[in-house]
Amino acid sequence: MSDDVYFYDPAEGHGLAHDPFKAIVAPRLIGWISSLDGRGRPNLAPYSFFGAFASNPAMIGFCSEGYKDSIRNIEETGEFVWNLPSHALAERMNRSSASVAPDVDEFALAGLTAATGRNVRVPHVAEAPAALECKLTQVVRLTDRDGGVMGNWLALGQVVGVHIRREFLRDGRFDTHAAQPVMRAGYRGDYARIGEMFEMLRPA
């Protein structure tokens, strides 16, 4: 092993005080997901594994470690909404992560306004700078390279509606810097927000 590179095989353990995986793959936008169960009860929860996977049509997804209410609800109704968690909403987003019974309304628990959806029945966070309404395309239970079933469920959805608060629109562009999305940035309790941004265009 080179003196200036630390290498480990995950199958043999990292040998460090803390697993560096989540700190290396960072920062990551938080999947702040709202859903409804089959009885119409709302749920709101943040997930640290979230991403955008396509743009035409727009597709996003999040992964749940454990079969939680969000996955169950989305399988029942076929709909969900991603809400952009801004720095101003960080504490309330964190409150929505509490482990509570399925009949507890996390919107109310976190002091948030549940805004009515346009193309889905699922409400979104009215205070969020942006929200993406989605129709479920698939839920995939992950497997490892040996085909072993994991306790992780990936939900993918096609964006069918976009809400943007007008204060975050500048000259026809969504102002990401002004929105200050909260991101996971490593170990337990580590978060980040956008600092300096720069432009770099692709080669012609």
Image (cartoon, grey):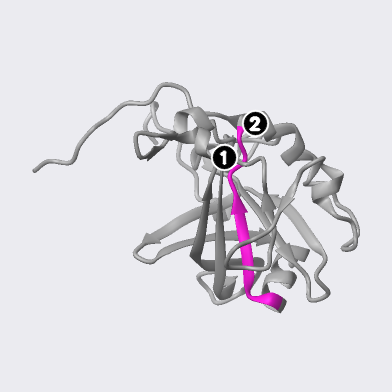
95 relative to 171 in the view: left or right: right
Q: Is residue 107 visible?
A: yes
123 relative to 192 in the view: left or right: right
Q: Position of residue 29 (x, y in %)?
A: 54, 43
130 relative to 88 in the view: left or right: left
Q: Position of residue 195 (x, y in %)?
A: 47, 23
Which dot marks residue 190? Answer: 2
Q: Is residue 66 visible?
A: no
Q: Residue furthest left?
A: 204
Q: Is residue 82 magenta?
A: yes
**Three-letter amino acid code at the position of disc 1:** Pro
Q: Quadrant of residue 66?
A: bottom right
Give the secondary structure at mark 2.
loop
Q: Nearer the viewer, mark 2 or mark 1?
A: 1
- Vertical placement of residue 117 versus 178, above or below: below
Near-viewer residue (109 or 155):
109
Tell me the residue at 63%/70% (across/down): 79
Q: Quadrant of residue 183?
A: top right
Which dot marks residue 10? Answer: none
Q: Which residue is mark 1?
A: 129
Q: Magenta region: which residues?
A: 77-86
